[in-house]
Image (cartoon, rainbow, N blue to C red):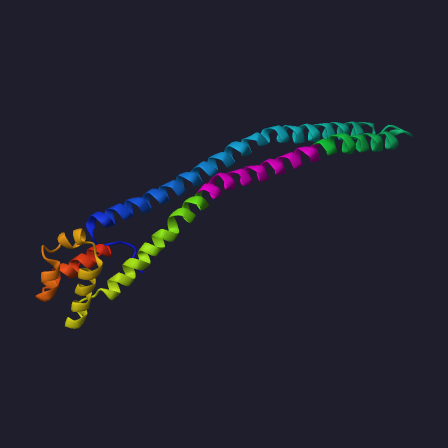
Amino acid sequence: MRFYSNIPHRFATRLLADALVVTAIVLLALLGLSVRETVNRLVVVPQGVRETGGAVQSGFQDAADAVGDVPIIGGDLSDAFESAGNGSGGRVESLGQEGIDRTHRLADLLGLLVFGLPAAAILVWYLPPRLALARRITVASQVLDDRTSPERRRLIAMRAAFALPFETLLRHTPDPVGDLAAERYDGLIAAVLDDSGLRR
């Protein structure tokens, strides 16, 4: 597959367009990563909740350890403190962890959306005509090879004289029909190649 014309100004124009599309996609990727990082910073709130729950649970556990050796009621008090710690601090810690997980998922989703939707739109808009152009240049480079036979040169020159706009022909020869009649095919073949984005 041939992706670029060998005519310098067309090559430069197409290369610049390709570079702009790649640059736009890279910038969108960086923007998506930036959004993801920014949303991930919001995780400090659920982290604080988780740490608070852990501290409450740890406090109740310390209290349970302290009263565990009290005669007669120590075991019951210790169990009550542990249960209270698990019920209050454990629940808060679990909610904090759930908040952290949801924040990370939201950050991933938003980053992907900020990158993915515009990048997909750019590629859907740019790639089909770009690939069609590459196919056209590839086919033209194979079909318009005039070195194989004099008859092929004549047919290519006829195609130029009969199908190309007159202003395109005049850029390559002052008398397209006269060149065809006199079997001077170089200018006509050059016009066809130029029209296809190629040159010898």
Q: Residue at x 72, y 30 (%)?
A: 58
Q: Is residue 140 left or right of residue 167?
A: right
Q: Is residue 67 visible?
A: yes
Rendered-image quadrant of the N terminus: bottom left
Residue segment shown in magenta: 93-118
Q: Is residue 184 left or right of residue 114?
A: left
> Please, is residue 131 above or below residue 76 in the view?
below
Asked whether 94 or 129 is in front, the reply is 129
Q: Position of residue 46 (x, y in %)?
A: 63, 31
Asked whether 195 or 17 is in front, the reply is 195
> Please, is residue 179 above or below residue 85 in the view?
below
Q: Is residue 3 left or right of residue 101?
A: left
Specify the quadrant of the image occupied by residue 156.
bottom left
> Please, is residue 94 above or below residue 21 in the view?
above
Please tell me whether the stretch drawn in magenta is mainly helix, strand or loop: helix
Asked whether 111 or 89 is in front, the reply is 111
Q: Residue at x 40, y 42 (%)?
A: 26
Q: Is residue 29 left or right of residue 188?
A: right
Q: Residue at x 88, y 32 (%)?
A: 76
Tell me if residue 96 is in the magenta stretch.
Answer: yes
Q: Position of residue 178 (x, y in %)?
A: 9, 61
Q: Position of residue 179 (x, y in %)?
A: 10, 62
Asked whether 19 or 174 is in front, the reply is 174
Residue extending furthest right?
72
The number of numbered badges drawn on the structure is 0
Q: Position of residue 7 (x, y in %)?
A: 20, 52
Tell me if residue 95 is in the magenta stretch.
Answer: yes
Specify the quadrant of the image occupied by residue 67.
top right
